Amino acid sequence: MADVEGPSEWKAFTAPWSRLLIIVSVLAAALCLAIAITRFSGALSFIPIVTMAGCALFTVRGYAITPEDNVVRRLFWNTRLPRIGLVSATFSPSAMKGSIRRFGNGGLFSFTGWFRNRELGNYRAFATDMTRSVVLRYPGKTIVVTPGDVEGFVRELIGS
């Protein structure tokens, strides 16, 4: 566990970035900036900057477990996933393998949005390192998160 701001009853977990996320984020941000700079006089030059800023807003900063919720810490807000109805929480390092992004962000500061693959079917991801995937199964929906301490996260979630 690591320090993540929140009430004292929160069990906080980091969201470490994978090498892939770092590389994709650096290259995509550089491309967005290059397009904006070279097209500075064009009317549409703001689009790459707005895209980059929008993706940055949805960055996953960390996770927390409260008595009522699993919390995804974003840049300026939290996304709450209720613990009520949670059927299982399983560490599965290859869970996101072969995924197709249906809607969302594929690597500019996070892997977030709605995805699909053979193993999980349709699912929602709040990820920064796909090899740390924890699959949360609810009736009718599946969610993937990627905490730094996957074993501690699963233990805290199912043990509480």
Image (cartoon, rainbow, N blue to C red):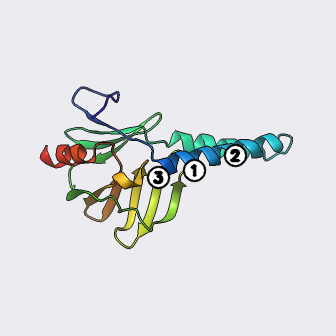
Q: Earlier in the sequence, mark 3 or mark 2?
A: 2
Question: Which residue is farthest left?
Answer: 159
Residue type beneath disc 2: Cys
Instruction: Name the residue tied to disc 2.
Output: 32
106 shown above or below 79: below
Tag nearer the camera, 1 or 2: 1
34 shown above or below 3: below
Q: Earlier in the sequence, mark 1 or mark 2?
A: 1
Residue type beneath disc 1: Val
Q: Looking at this view, is 158 or 43 the one in front?
A: 158
Distance CA(mark 1)–CA(mark 2): 12 Å
Percent coordinates x, y for residue 76 in the rendering: 47, 33
Instruction: Name the residue tied to disc 1.
Output: 24
Quarter holding the C terminus is top left
Mark 3, Cα crowd under 10 Å, few <14 / some 14-19 / many 20+, is many
Q: Looking at this view, is 155 or 7 the one in front?
A: 155
**At x 69% / y 45%, what residue is drawn?**
32
Percent coordinates x, y for residue 131 in the rendering: 37, 54
The secondary element bearing badge 1 is classed as helix
In the rendering, which numbered label is found on residue 82?
none
Q: Looking at this view, is 61 or 77 the one in front?
A: 61
**At x 62% / y 43%, what residue is drawn?**
52
Mark 2, Cα crowd under 10 Å, few <14 / some 14-19 / many 20+, is some
- Residue 104 relative to residue 74: left or right: right
Distance CA(mark 3)–CA(mark 1): 14 Å
Residue type beneath disc 3: Thr
Instruction: Name the residue tied to disc 3.
Output: 112
- Residue 90 relative to residue 40: left or right: left
